[in-house]
Amino acid sequence: MKEKEDQINIKIPYELKAHYYNICRSRHINPSALIRKWIAQFVESGDATVTFQTFSNSTRVELAKYRRKK
């Protein structure tokens, strides 16, 4: 039996999405597959307290820039 599929819709700044897709395209990565992998790794970790502490300070600054543009 084929596993049922569903979708998740998230809101992110347009510039962030465009940048993400450009990076994926340049590295020949399927952007949706990469996000599915991140979600699977998070779920399979079995630790509900896991957070994404992998954001560097520069990433936090970039995210803040995207938010300020609105």
Image (cartoon, rainbow, N blue to C red):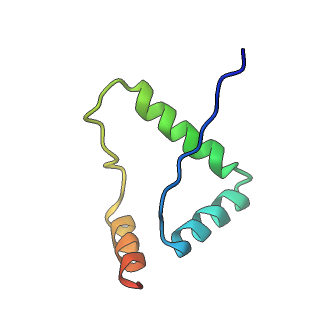
* Coordinates of residue 35 in the picture (x, y in percent): 56, 45
* Coordinates of residue 41 in the picture (x, y in percent): 47, 32
Residue extending furthest toward the bottom: 69
Rendered position, 61 above or below 33: below
Image-quadrant location for residue 61:
bottom left
Rendered position, 41 above or below 18: above
* Coordinates of residue 57 in the picture (x, y in percent): 31, 65
| 43 with respect to 3 (left or right) | left
At x 36%, y 50%, the residue is 54
At x 55%, y 73%, the residue is 14
Pick the quarter of the image with the C terminus.
bottom left
At x 47%, y 63%, the residue is 11
Rendered position, 24 above or below 53: below
| 9 with respect to 43 (left or right) | right
Residue extending furthest toward the left: 49
17, 58: nearer the viewer:
17
Pick the quarter of the image with the N terminus.
top right
At x 40%, y 73%, the residue is 62
40, 58: nearer the viewer:
40
* Coordinates of residue 58 in the picture (x, y in percent): 37, 69
